[in-house]
Image (spheres, helix red, strand yellow):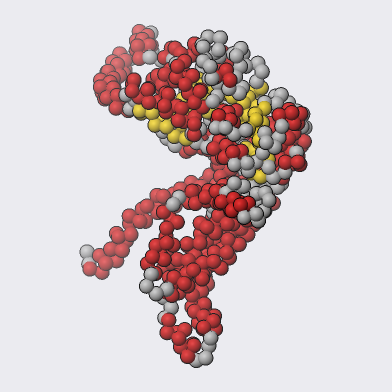
Amino acid sequence: MDTTRRYERLRERYLNGGLERRQFLGLIGAAGLASGLHTPFARLARAQDVTQVRFDGWGGVVSEAFRQHAFDPYTEATGITVVDGTFGGADEYLANVRASQPGAFNIAHLSGVFDYARWHNLELTTELNEDNIPNMEFLIPKLVNVFREITDGTLSAVPYNYGTTGLAYNRAHISDEEMREKGARILIDDAYAGKIGGWGEWRTRIWMAALATDQDPNDIQDMEAVWDAIRQHRDLALKYWGSGAELMSLLAEEEIYVTEGWSGRIYALQEQGHDIGYYDPPNGFGWQECLFVIKGSPMEACEELLNFMLAPETSIAVAEGQNYPPALDPQKVDLGEKIPTLPAFDPSGTLDGLTFAQPAYWNGNEQEWSETFSRVQRGF
Amino acid sequence: MSVEARERRQPWILLSPALTAITLLLFIPLLFIVVYSFWLRTAVGGVEVTFSTQNWQQALTDPFYRYILFATLRIAFVTTIFCAVLGYPAAYFIARARGNRTILLLLLMLPFWISYIIRTMSWINILGVSGALNTVMLSLGIVDEPVQMLYNEATVILGLVHFLLPFMVLNVYVSVEGIDRSLEDAACSLGATRFQAFREVTLPLSLPGLAAGGLLCFVLAAGTYITPLILGGPRDAMFANLVFEAIITQLNWPMGSALSLLLLLVLGAVVAVYNHFMGMSQLSRGLA
């Protein structure tokens, strides 16, 4: 409710006899005094406050791309510094945010719609003023709408890019034909014992195990079969990797021959000259990443940064740097030459070929599955 | 105020900054953790403020936690033994060296100048499939294909020994250095061989240092979670990894609090046993 409306209501109550004249004048006087004291100092405080915005992302080539193509030009244009930090995983980051004061963290490059829902459940969402982000018009509608469904039509984030977690394999040891034939079952293939890797994250492990047991990852019927497949994978795997850098190192150094991997990271390896293949099996793990504005952040400065980052030239430059297709609709924006060659890119802009995790399904099972995975991982 | 009263107050005044810091940074956070351990996790990962012993019951009775706790204590024990076996001769050598002791001590401190994580990760470049050791063995024809040496319990112990060895060496060094050399000479003059003199005189007198180093290595090893994360395989985890997972991955702060307090109590018991037999004075001398 704005101040004018509040005064009008007070006046209405006074005229209707709900307030005594003395009370009414007292309230108006107090409001005037508060406003007089508040306005000059608050303006000063606001002007002093927003000198920087904190951004946290995945690090590596992704952060470098953001710094070069988005943050430095934004600082040059607005005078607001972007302090960027990195995290190894969304879980770790969420714990940090929960343990900190509101406003300590502002914008995060989160992945997955289920993360958006989880953050909303923990009351960490904000409400973006979309009028301040005109570049949202270039976004793929499907990527925006899934967020709206969670936060009752409003947005606390804008989609930024999407990608897949597919199967990455060393082509010197595994042929393209073998990979297509075996699909996710290759992750539990005895022939590659000791040369298999995997992300030590419960969602991905369960998703891959569901594929290996021919189940729909968004509607798993035989959970015991999934846990058995995870146990098999655990016994055959050399290492659960914990970051994109570790994934790339394990594949590049040939410590492992096959693992699931993030499409952009695998593309980066291919660009470096490593003969690593990438295959998205049917029902492969599609995800989108968003720029999430956290509760307690300076909204206008954040919205300005989001608009700047969504500008097609910035968005495309970042996408080319991080090797994930941007959330820009190819039907509305010319994405240049490199982006159409990236894994997971959908020229139609409908993203119908990608399977995303259903937030309600995965978040509903989160507690039980994450705890069980912790046990299964250690031999139980 | 009388002189006696002032003198009685003086230590407390001098201690007050340290006591304030310990209260604010250790005891109050610890109190928070104790309180959290009796709360419950909500379905969405929040905290339900209620009094429940459920987390403690699970932590104490669940065989999974018992198994990981024993595995942690076993790894810490083996690490401590390796540190003692490798550290004692090194410490003895430094303590008995003539002339260049400062340089040797400096070399001992050198690893502390490099991040623990970097030091741990360095083993990947040494033991990896395309690491230094495999490259040498392949070029010398000792093996036909790279040997898989990384990502198992042995490499976790190796990483921990690498990290903790200086703590052991320093403690033993302080102890050996404080032993009067003429005692060994006296033993020899009475007919003992050098080895007998060491076994009967030097070793018993240096045991407090060895025990202090052992305690430090054991407690630090049992509380680590980085080493198994970097050098361990899928199954290799220590108790601190479970605390990390409960708090970070599962957002189960109450359970994570109960687990961390359980580890604290177990390690506290080890320290209490040490204190009963050896006293804490040797420990502070080794750390000084």
Q: Position of residue A72 (x, y in %)?
A: 37, 26
- Rendered view: B177 above or below A152: below
Give the mark count.
0
Q: Nearer the viewer, residue A149 or A15?
A: A149
Q: Nearer the viewer, residue A223 or A322?
A: A322
Which residue lies most toward the bottom here?
A: B190
Residue at image coords 35%, 56%: B18
Q: Position of residue A1 (x, y in %)?
A: 41, 15
Q: Nearer the viewer, residue A35 or A280?
A: A280
- Rendered view: A86 above or below B146: above
Residue B96 is at least partly visible in this image: yes
Q: Is residue A142 left or right of residue B97?
A: right
Q: Position of residue A329 (x, y in %)?
A: 54, 13
Residue at image coords 44%, 70%: B94
Q: Is residue A47 left or right of residue B193?
A: left
Residue at image coords 55%, 29%: A271
